[in-house]
């Protein structure tokens, strides 16, 4: 049972893109597990009501937690390249609706699993499956013939903690560790210097 189910939470994705665009995006990720809603017509009306529609016609990247009475209990508006802190989000959800007694919570193992060791490669890219800049960076490294190790921070939460330490608390992807140097975001100039240094 995943953690959203434990707090009886319905996750919805909302975008100002059209339905065909959302379908193509979901398919490019191999499918997603929650409903996507199109705020395409009238364009951005829901985003406008929530105060996150930009004058350029697209919405800010934002998370809203709304309780059963329709009261907004949490708002997080962040840069499109930044990843929200999932642990903070789960903390808010559990605060809004503490775990009810009728929903079982998995018993944690007697001993915590060993965190995955940091990869020992010269070039490590920390990424997420849905990050467009990660796809570009992956193609760039392949094109240059650079061998690298890819770490999915959605699966390796210990790596996500390292990432937040490097980026000031954000899960910004892609982030690179090249021979010990940290490079945040897909910056070709900085990557070229680090790779040839």
Image (tube, rainbow, N blue to C red):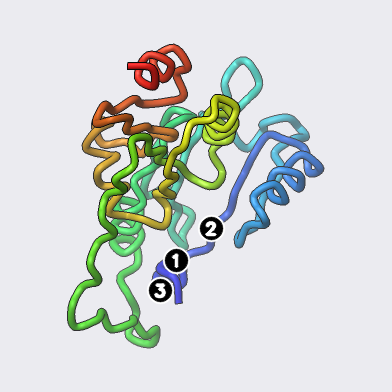
State the residue position of label 2: 11
Where in the figure is residue 94, as x and y percent of width and height? Answer: 31, 64
User: Quick check: marks 2 and 3 in contact, CB under 8 Å?
Assistant: no
Residue at the image point whose x is 36% and y is 55% from the top: 156
Name above or below for residue 138 compared with residue 63. above
User: Quick check: marks 3 and 1 in contact, CB under 8 Å?
Assistant: yes
Residue lying farthest to the left in this orientation = 111
Residue at the image point whose x is 66% and y is 51% from the top: 36
Q: Secondary structure at mark 2?
A: loop
Quadrant location of the C terminus?
top left
Which is nearer the eye, 11 or 161?
161
Residue at the image point whose x is 37% and y is 35% from the top: 123
Where in the figure is residue 162, as x and y percent of width and height? Answer: 25, 43
Between the residue at mark 1 and the residue at mark 2, the CA separation in whole angstroms equals 8 Å
**Which quadrant holds residue 17?**
top right
Name above or below for residue 172 compared with residue 160. above
Q: Residues within 10 Å of mark 2 (few under 14, many from 20)?
A: few
State the residue position of label 1: 4
State the residue position of label 3: 6
Residue at the image point whose x is 76% and y is 39% from the top: 21
Q: Is residue 124 left or right of residue 20?
A: left
User: Quick check: marks 1 and 2 in contact, CB under 8 Å?
Assistant: yes
Q: Residues within 10 Å of mark 1 (few under 14, many from 20)?
A: few
Between the residue at mark 2 and the residue at mark 3, the CA separation in whole angstroms equals 13 Å
């Amino acid at each position: 049972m995943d953690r959203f189910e434990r707090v009886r939470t319905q996750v919805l994705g909302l975008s100002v893109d059209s339905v065909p665009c959302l379908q193509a995006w979901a398919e490019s990720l191999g499918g997603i597990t929650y409903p996507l809603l199109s705020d395409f017509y009238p364009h951005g009306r829901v985003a406008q009501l929530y105060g996150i529609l930009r004058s350029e016609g697209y919405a800010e990247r934002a998370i809203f937690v709304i309780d059963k009475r329709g009261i907004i209990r949490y708002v997080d508006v962040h840069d499109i390249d930044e990843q929200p802190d999932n642990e903070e989000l789960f903390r808010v959800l559990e605060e809004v609706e503490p775990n009810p007694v009728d929903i079982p919570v998995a018993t944690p193992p007697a001993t915590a699993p060993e965190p995955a060791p940091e990869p020992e490669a010269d070039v490590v890219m920390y990424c997420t499956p849905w990050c467009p800049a990660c796809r570009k960076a992956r193609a760039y490294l392949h094109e240059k013939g650079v061998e690298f190790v890819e770490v999915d921070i959605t699966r390796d939460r210990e790596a996500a903690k390292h990432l937040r330490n490097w980026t000031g608390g954000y899960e910004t992807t892609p982030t690179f560790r090249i021979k010990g140097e940290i490079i945040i975001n897909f910056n070709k100039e900085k990557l070229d210097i680090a790779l040839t240094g």
